[in-house]
Image (cartoon, rainbow, N blue to C red):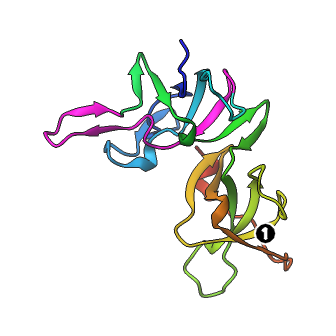
Amino acid sequence: MKGIFDFVVIPKDDRYNNTKNISGQELILNTELQNHNFVSRVGIVMAAPSTNTTGVREGDEVILHHNVFRRFRDIRGVEKNSKSYYKDNMYFVSPDQIFAYKRMVKWIPLNGFNFVKPIKEDKMFSTNFEKPLVGVLKYKDPNLHSVNEGDLVGFKPGSEYDFLINKEKLYRVPTNLITIKYEYQGNEKEYNPSWAKSS
């Protein structure tokens, strides 16, 4: 089965990432359907569309929009699948819902998207763990010029959306919302919360 414009994708593991195994016991972290933070955003491509210009191929692991695998309740309270659902745990996914794909061991963002790792806040009396609106460019949009992976960049407020990739918390930042390249001062440290490392 192959779509004309859409990919056919299945979840890599489960549709929701709302459990954690602690000392052999399963702990349920969330029971709400509506909370997008616990929806799986990693899938496997079963079929690429006939008109594919993304570089994503069958068998690739992909980072997706949170609404692809999400379930919800309609106005009558009836639980339903997302509009992407096809059948038998397969989903139709449009190219604009895919943000990155994995080729061998490297993640490659699609055009228009970057992944930025936050850095630790260094102000002594700040209550924040992360320095706001600045981070290390980990995976770069192929069309983003004048900056390289590993550079320190700034981005507009509200442009960051967090993903968990290779046990690292990364922000997906659209290319047109990256605003500046900073010079390293020597005291920057990447920040990764403990929950990311243990997932």
Query: Residue 177 falls in which quadrant of the image?
Result: bottom right
Q: Position of residue 140 (x, y in %)?
A: 76, 53
Residue under the point 66% across and 46% down: 167
Residue under the point 60% across and 88% down: 125
Of the pair 12 and 189, the residue shown nearer to us: 12
Horizontal side, residue 86 vs residue 198: left or right = left
Q: Quadrant of the C terminus?
A: top right
Q: Mark 1 points at which residue?
A: 152
Q: Is residue 195 visible?
A: no
On whether residue 63 falls in the magenta region, the answer is yes
Horizontal side, residue 82 vs residue 119: left or right = left
Where is 166 relative to 24, above or below? below
Of the pair 41 and 176, the residue shown nearer to us: 176
Question: How many numbered marks appear?
Answer: 1
Q: Position of residue 117 (x, y in %)?
A: 69, 60
Q: Residues within 10 Å of mark 1 (few under 14, many from 20)?
A: many
In this picture, which residue range is highlighted in magenta?
57-82
Q: Where is residue 23 in the image (x, y as percent from the top left)?
A: 53, 37
On whether residue 67 falls in the magenta region, the answer is yes
What is the residue that sits farthest to the left in this orientation? 76
Of the pair 132 and 99, the residue shown nearer to us: 99
By secondary structure, the bulk of the magenta-drawn segment is best described as loop
Horizontal side, residue 55 vs residue 64: left or right = right
Residue under the point 53% across and 11% down: 1
What is the residue that sits farthest to the top in this orientation? 1
Q: Where is residue 62 in the image (x, y as percent from the top left)?
A: 62, 35
Residue under the point 42% across and 41% down: 67
Q: Is residue 109 visible?
A: yes
**Label 1: which secondary element:** strand
The amino acid type of the residue labelled 1 equals Leu
